[in-house]
Amino acid sequence: MNNRRIIRATLLALATLTSSCQASISEREKGWCSDIDFLLKEVQRQHYIYKSQPLPSALVQAATKLKAEIPRFSDERMLVELQRLTVFLGDGHCYVLPFGAQRIASKVLPLRFYLFSDGLYVIDAEGDHERWIGCRVLKFASTAAEAAMAQMSSLISRDNDMGIKWIGPLFLRFRGGLETVTPDLNSQNILVTLEDRNRQKTETTLTPIAAPPMRGLPKLIPSKLSGAPPAPLYLENVTSLYWIKELSENKTVYVQFNQVMNEAQESLANFAGRLQSVLEEKQPVKLIIDVRHNNGGNADLLGPLIEVLSRFEKRDPSYKLFVLTGRNTFSAAQIFISRVDHLTNAVFAGEPSSSKPNFVGEENGVVLPWSGAICSISNRYHESIPNDQRHWIEPEIKIELSAQDYFANRDPVLEAVLSK
């Protein structure tokens, strides 16, 4: 199909979508219809793939169906349903945020969830709900937590399925997200069934609160369970962009790399230089780079750090380089680990990342005109390893964090690597 036919087919599909809204009975419906049309037109104009191909027919059909359902959906659910449309685009950088829209006050449960190897648990809470920290989530209204998470596959934009584990628990905190997966939900007073550490089940009714301001997805925090030991090394300082710690008993240097950005006091290039000096002075036999909390940034900054890692490995064949990855490893952090995988013999440990070695992705902001919803449309392809078709870099030492280890502030991934 040539470009002229592509454009003609796309304009016809979008015209059909627009006409389906002309009979709307309220300004709200007209507004949401206009946002749907605008989103699809921007995808057609900007997306790396769909600026030269017709939109997926399933996306166009879903958009048409969504327009008919506007009257029965809340505004918060509409944000999530718009997000569902972006899933058809097939990458993790296309999204509609469930919060931050100018016209919509999104609300969340006063609990924060995380999906461990043994289930969905409460890891943090607002106000007087802290007593639920450490509890396993069994149900939202009548919907089992497992079933709710399974439905996230149609709601979460992603490069691979680790993105569902990463982002799905966040969506289950939003009232709009819960409305999509729980048909009998009371949106004003949400019934949640929890199981405590003694296997006692409790039903509690939670009133949603205003969504807190967020810049990106929140990183994992140390266990807040009463009586937990001190935080493990990987959770001690997740707010710093990068830092170094010598583990002298193991002749090991540990580096936590939490964001691909320049720190105000020290650029990433200068940090790489400082790391090089530490390696020359301490002569460790093992270097550990932990990117489990790193969800991206500016990949153009990565060169000096990758050069230091390559130089370390070449110094002595017995030296070992380890890279710790997880579901929060994404975007520019994926470019980092892809290049390290391609250029070195690093051993990967932990969980797979939420990106592919090669992926479509770039934060490219769009604001919908009626709702003010915040969106992103990917407009760039990143190829770090030519012709690599893997969904992720499979860790040689594969460990998924359990609730038991997390709440006891243990780090089985670092323990396993230090034992090698």
Image: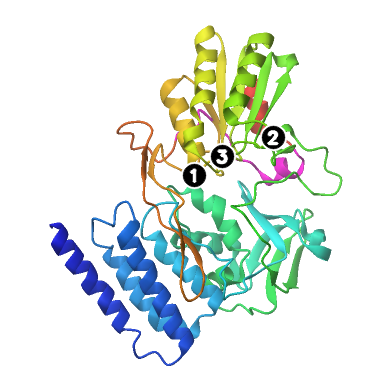
Q: Mark 1 vs mark 2: which is more N-terminal? A: 2
**Residue linked to disc 1:** 354
Q: In the figure, 371 relative to 382: above or below?
A: below
Which residue is found at the position 24% from the left and 61% from the top?
Answer: 54
Q: Quadrant of residue 11?
A: bottom left
In the rendered structure, the answer to whether residue 408 lies left or right of residue 160 reads right
- In x, y percent, where is residue 135? 74, 56
Q: Residue furthest bottom?
A: 25
- In x, y percent, where is residue 174? 61, 67
CB under 8 Å between discs 2 and 3:
no
**Amino acid type, residue under disc 3 in the picture:** Gly
**Residue linked to disc 3:** 326
Membership of 402 in magenta stretch: yes
**Amino acid type, residue under disc 2 in the picture:** Tyr
**Residue linked to disc 2:** 234
Magenta range: 393-409
- In x, y percent, where is residue 179? 56, 74
Q: In the figure, 295 relative to 377: above or below?
A: above
Q: Is residue 120 visible?
A: no
| C-alpha distance separating marks 1 and 3 | 8 Å
Q: Quadrant of the N terminus?
A: bottom left
Q: Quadrant of the C terminus?
A: top right
Q: Mark 2 vs mark 3: which is more N-terminal? A: 2
Q: In the figure, 222 relative to 215: above or below?
A: above
